[in-house]
Image: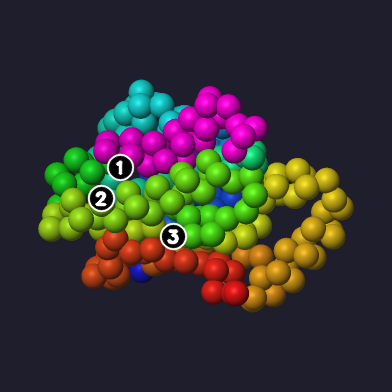
Amino acid sequence: MNWQGKVIVVTGGGGGIGRAVAHKFAAQGGQVVVIDLMAAHAETVAQEIIDAGGQAIEMQANVALEIDVKRVIRDTLGKLGKIDVLVNNAAMCPQIRLTDMSLDQWNQVITNNLTSVFLCCREVIPCMLANGGGSIVNVSSVHALATLEGYSAYSASKGGIVAMTRAIALDYARQNIRVNTVLPGAVQTPMLENSVKNLGMPREEIMKQWNEAQPIGRVGQPEEIATVVMFAASPENSFMTGATLVADGGMTADL
């Protein structure tokens, strides 16, 4: 797919899966808006893309805040004139047992992971409608399907993304806006590395166990998830909306 002339907004684009998504779209000619909570991370990824001959701009935002989302979408339209693709990727993943979790901690996860998707979709869809259509890809997680101890808030937020994706897809199916969700499994990202640190075991031992636990024999790479995101976003994939795409190396297929 040639993304020449298309504008792609990627939240959480400063690292991990978001960084890989931004690079993949830019490599195919897209103009990428890299949005991240950490301005330096967004700037680094945008500069990497520019150095590789692509087109990118960076924007700092906390996509859990309505005022920030309104600002970056307004600024994107002011600079680039339209938005063809929105990739909602920003997320946080604390590991806290339910009875150890405060209401503030619960709200922080839900707001960062789920409310951010609502806010970004709500701001982007009107300009997609005005432009004749568009594509939204929401990055969820296999934790929407099955989970582990300590992930009650995270799994709730990711399950909510799957359900909300279906609803938004139906709201705008007749107006040429497709909305799909991608569920990554264990992927080599900073989020995974933070989980490794929290386990209090040697990294090499943990990674060996995690690799062996995957039916495919290894954890995934961000670029592999980015490929699925691009497939979901592509206009060549024009008959798919409201779909849930699982990219987990066979994890959720294993009894």
Query: Marks 1 and 2: in contact by CB < 8 Å?
Result: yes
Instruction: Decide if residue 226 is on the left or right side of residue 180.
Output: right
Circle 2: element type: helix
Q: Can I make out residue 65 in this image?
A: yes
Residue 36, position in %: x, y?
50, 36
The mark nearer the N terminus, 3 or 2, is 2
What is the magenta segment's predominant secondary structure? Answer: helix
- The residue at 18%/52% (across/down) is 172
- The residue at 62%/60% (across/down) is 186
The image quadrant where one finds the C terminus is bottom right
- The residue at 64%/40% (across/down) is 97
Residue 18, position in %: x, y?
51, 49
The mark nearer the N terminus, 1 or 3, is 1
Pointer 1 residue: 121
| 203 over 38 or under it: above or below | below
Pointer 3 residue: 182
The mark nearer the N terminus, 2 or 1, is 1
Residue 168, numbered circle: 2
Give whichever of 116, 232 is nearer the camera: 116
Alpha carbon separation for disc pair 3 and 2: 15 Å
Amino acid beneath label 1: Cys
Amino acid beneath label 2: Ile
200 inside magenta stretch: no
| Residues drawn in magenta | 98-123
Query: Marks 2 and 3: in contact by CB < 8 Å?
Result: no
| 229 over 92 or under it: above or below | below
Badge 1 density bin: few <14, some 14–19, many ≥20, Cα 10 Å: many
- The residue at 43%/51% (across/down) is 159
Residue 82, numbered circle: none
